[in-house]
Image: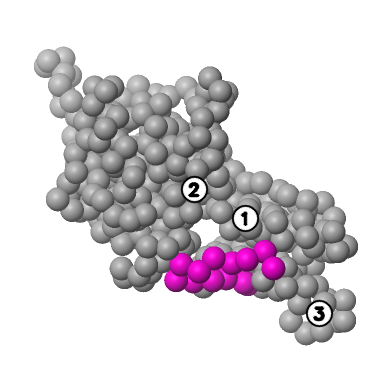
């Protein structure tokens, strides 16, 4: 099939259906409302079920129940809505219920604005709920990548029995780009869902989906089991892009749509003779620490985000604090421009050339 032009939010919905997700529970909130609207129309056509819950809290607990029965299930929201879902997400993590949670990020804190943002990095990567748990986090930079990552997220969720998050700022949800739903994709040998709590006709013992462990020793063993799983995910599921980093004196670090703005800045800086490149994390967790070992010429790193610098700590850890880490960001729904990013890079590179103090 040829590429088709789709809005980001609708492409997310179609990708979920293509991945075999026939059950969606959600609640409308800008700038992701087109997604539940699309699924409310399309899921019945494939024998699926769409439920607009009375709240985000109700929606994530419906996800918990449906996912526990073994079906592929998804919810979506925007920043304050995903904040409300955090208790249910940690329940899913503790009970090892696979599901996909999509966050079309907007400015905050609180209700904030409906404009695009990346200020949910902490909530997504550090865990917004309680306890020792992690969730894989994908960050698409285009509508095509949004499609690819949603489909992969369902496979990863099933492979590891874990919630998986996909985070995209409001620009991804609202922009229209050509997408190909028939491109070749990574094949995974997924395990049978013999753990699922569903009908068994008395042929086995009942399966129990639960995150409650009243005995400390038992809960510690469960946490250690989860930690082993997370280490396996860190070993196998890291994704990132290296862009013109081979000879770069300054390497940008950016994800999502901001990385595209950074690439525009890089093209202009390269034409002026500046050696600059980009590390783009495609997975925010696990974070691509190995990428920072592949930039031998770099003298400085410049993190660019639509936030006040939430990714900086991960970048410092990834480079083992061996390089100065600078920052340029906009907040509250403001979008950085290529010109402003280039100006910040020149400021840093000028200091390097003049031997100035950072």
| Residues tagged 3 and 2 counted as in contact (Cβ below 8 A) | no
Q: In this orientation, which residue lies closer to the viewer: 245 or 193?
A: 245
- Residue underneath mark 3: 351
The numbered mark, 3 or 2, whose residue comes first in the sequence reads 2
Task: State the SS at label 3.
Answer: helix
Q: In this orientation, which residue lies closer to the viewer: 134 or 105?
A: 105
Asked if residue 224 lies in the magenta stretch, the reply is no
Name the spot of residue 36 as percent of width and height, x first.
29, 42
| Residues tagged 2 and 1 counted as in contact (Cβ below 8 A) | no
Whether 308 is drawn above or below 240: the answer is: below
Name the spot of residue 43 as percent of width and height, x first.
27, 29
Q: Is residue 34 left or right of residue 336?
A: left
Residue plotted at (22% across, 35% down): 50
Characterize the local packing of mark 2: few (<14), some (14-19) or many (20 or more) Cα atoms within 10 angstroms: few
Q: Quadrant of residue 106?
A: bottom left
| Badge number at residue 259 | 1
Whether 130 is drawn above or below 20: the answer is: below
Residue plotted at (23% across, 41% down): 25
Whether 121 is drawn above or below 164: the answer is: below
Name the spot of residue 219 as percent of width and height, x first.
27, 50
The numbered mark, 1 or 3, whose residue comes first in the sequence reads 1
Extent of the magenta region: 327-339
Characterize the local packing of mark 3: few (<14), some (14-19) or many (20 or more) Cα atoms within 10 angstroms: few
For the stretch drawn in magenta, what is the main secondary structure?
Answer: loop
The extreme left residue here reads 202
Q: In this orientation, which residue lies closer to the viewer: 141 or 101?
A: 141
- Residue underneath mark 2: 175
């Amino acid at each position: 099939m040829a590429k088709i032009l789709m809005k980001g939010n609708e492409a997310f919905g179609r990708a979920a259906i293509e991945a075999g997700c026939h059950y969606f529970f959600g609640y409308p909130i800008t700038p992701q409302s087109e997604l539940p609207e699309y699924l409310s129309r399309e899921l019945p056509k494939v024998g699926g079920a769409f439920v607009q819950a009375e709240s985000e809290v109700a929606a994530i607990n419906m996800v918990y129940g449906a996912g526990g029965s073994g079906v592929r299930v998804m919810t979506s929201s925007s920043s304050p809505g995903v904040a409300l879902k955090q208790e249910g997400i940690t329940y899913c993590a503790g009970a090892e219920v696979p599901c996909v949670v999509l966050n079309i990020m907007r400015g905050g804190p609180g209700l904030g604005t409906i404009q695009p943002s990346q200020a949910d990095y902490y909530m997504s990567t550090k865990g917004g709920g309680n306890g020792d748990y992690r969730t894989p986090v994908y960050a698409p930079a285009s509508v095509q990548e949004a499609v690819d990552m949603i489909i992969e997220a369902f496979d990863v969720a099933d492979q590891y029995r874990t919630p998986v998050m996909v985070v995209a700022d409001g620009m991804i949800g609202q922009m229209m780009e050509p997408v190909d739903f028939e491109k070749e994709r990574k094949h995974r040998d997924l395990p049978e869902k013999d753990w699922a709590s569903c009908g068994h006709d008395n042929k086995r013992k009942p399966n129990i989906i639960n995150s409650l462990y009243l005995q400390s020793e038992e809960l510690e063993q469960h946490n250690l089991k989860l930690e082993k799983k997370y280490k396996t995910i860190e070993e196998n599921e890291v994704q990132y892009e290296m862009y013109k980093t081979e000879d770069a004196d300054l390497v940008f670090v950016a994800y999502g749509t901001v990385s595209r703005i950074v690439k525009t800045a890089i093209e202009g800086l390269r034409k002026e003779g500046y050696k600059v490149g980009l590390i783009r994390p495609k997975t925010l967790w696990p974070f691509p620490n190995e990428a920072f070992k592949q930039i031998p010429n770099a003298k400085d790193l410049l993190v660019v985000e639509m936030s006040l610098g939430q990714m900086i700590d991960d970048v410092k850890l990834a480079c083992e604090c061996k390089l100065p880490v600078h920052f340029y960001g906009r907040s509250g729904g403001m979008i950085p421009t290529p010109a402003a990013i280039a100006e910040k890079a020149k400021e840093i590179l000028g200091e390097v050339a003049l031997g100035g103090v950072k």
